[in-house]
Image (cartoon, rainbow, N blue to C red):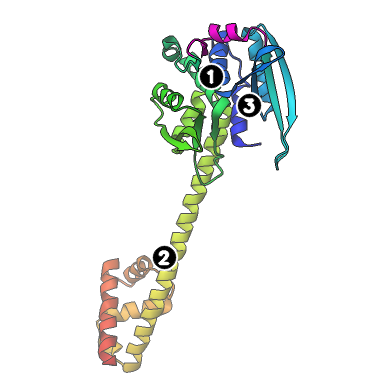
């Protein structure tokens, strides 16, 4: 099961009050339904690949729709060969759509705007947005490398209106294959959106997976950095030991300062030590020095070696 489907089933596992049912179905029907004329007259068809989603919508519909509701299962012939579950509404469809403020038959168009009191009442607004997501939304699994949540519409007016009533979420609008898509990519905002539409269980899973993933990525970066630093330290130490051996062969080492001679001795005895560790070992020998001082001493050693070579 996809993570999007998990979110949708999670939303519908909650108990809705009648006002919330009305708002949820208003969004779900407007952005999921298709209309057709049959021997029963005007009918509405809605579909989902989830039996749980269709069953839950069916139970909600019984609260406000007095006509006939049939369920049909269609076996998809595509590669995945999954089942598609359909709801078919028949009866007083026109009166139902007018009463629920979903369709303007005189203007022959969908009613995009919702009552202002729905926007002002948070639980109703959240239910409407939840219905939108169940109808036309999707979200990537947090295990993927791409955080992404979107809502897809057939007309730009719907996309722009939903962006307007979701001011707290900075959606962006794009066109994709004759569809109008509003989307977000920030993981924290996606988590907040899942919380807003009452997909609490999915939100917790999303956050846990995201945090674990981010922690693992941070740990991997730290390990890679440590390995890289260790390689640099080892390479630098090998070069420094080479310089020290050259000084020793030429007997030039004995002419240098006591600090340099002490550093040469410690470096030969500790070929894998970092500058911080060399600083500590020098202090044990009674020589007060910093990492910058150690670096300067090695520069002097390198210069002496170059003079020998010349």
Give residue 75's quadrant in the image: top right
Nearer the N terminus, badge 2 or badge 3?
3
Q: CA distance from mark 2 to mark 1?
A: 56 Å
The answer to whether residue 289 shows anywhere in this view is no
Report how many numbered discs are placed on residues in the image. Answer: 3
Which quadrant is home to the C terminus?
Answer: bottom left
The disc at residue 110 is: none
In the picture of the structure, the residue carrying the numbered disc 1 is 27
Label 1 Cα neighbours within 10 Å, binned few <14 / some 14-19 / many ≥20: many
- Secondary structure of the residue carrying numbered label 1: helix
In the picture of the structure, the residue carrying the numbered disc 3 is 9
- Disc 2 + disc 1, Cβ < 8 Å: no
Q: CA distance from mark 2 to mark 3?
A: 48 Å
In the picture of the structure, the residue carrying the numbered disc 2 is 229
Residue 228 image position (x, y, % from top left): 44, 65
Which quadrant is home to the N terminus?
Answer: top right
Residue 18 image position (x, y, % from top left): 58, 8
Q: In the picture shown, does residue 225 fall above or below 234?
A: above
């Amino acid at each position: 099961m996809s993570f999007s489907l998990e979110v949708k089933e999670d939303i519908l596992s909650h108990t809705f009050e009648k006002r919330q049912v009305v708002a949820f179905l208003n969004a779900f029907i407007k952005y999921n339904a298709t209309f057709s004329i049959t021997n029963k007259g005007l009918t509405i068809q809605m579909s989902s690949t989830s039996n749980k989603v269709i069953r839950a919508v069916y139970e909600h519909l019984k609260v406000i729709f007095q006509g006939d509701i049939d369920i049909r299962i269609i076996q998809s012939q595509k590669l995945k060969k999954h089942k598609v579950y359909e709801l078919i509404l028949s009866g007083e469809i026109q009166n139902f759509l007018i009463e629920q403020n979903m369709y303007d038959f005189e203007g022959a168009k969908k009613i995009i705007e919702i009552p202002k009191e729905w926007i002002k009442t948070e639980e109703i607004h959240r239910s409407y947005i939840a219905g939108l997501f169940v109808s036309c939304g999707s979200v990537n699994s947090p295990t993927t490398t791409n955080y992404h949540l979107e809502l897809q519409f057939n007309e730009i007016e719907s996309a722009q209106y939903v962006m307007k009533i979701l001011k707290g979420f900075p959606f962006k609008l794009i066109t994709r294959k004759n569809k109008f898509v509003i989307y977000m990519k920030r993981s924290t905002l996606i988590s907040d959106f899942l919380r807003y539409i009452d997909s609490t269980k999915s939100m917790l899973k999303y956050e846990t997976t995201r945090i674990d993933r981010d922690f693992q990525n941070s740990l991997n970066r730290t390990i890679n950095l440590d390995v890289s630093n260790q390689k640099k330290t080892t390479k630098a130490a090998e070069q420094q030991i080479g310089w020290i051996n050259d000084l020793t062969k030429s007997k030039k080492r004995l002419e240098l300062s006591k600090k340099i001679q002490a550093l040469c001795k410690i470096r030969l005895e500790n070929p894998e030590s970092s500058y911080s560790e060399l600083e500590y070992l020098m202090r044990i020998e009674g020589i007060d020095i910093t990492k910058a001082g150690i670096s300067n001493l090695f520069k002097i050693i390198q210069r002496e070696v170059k003079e020998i070579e010349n």
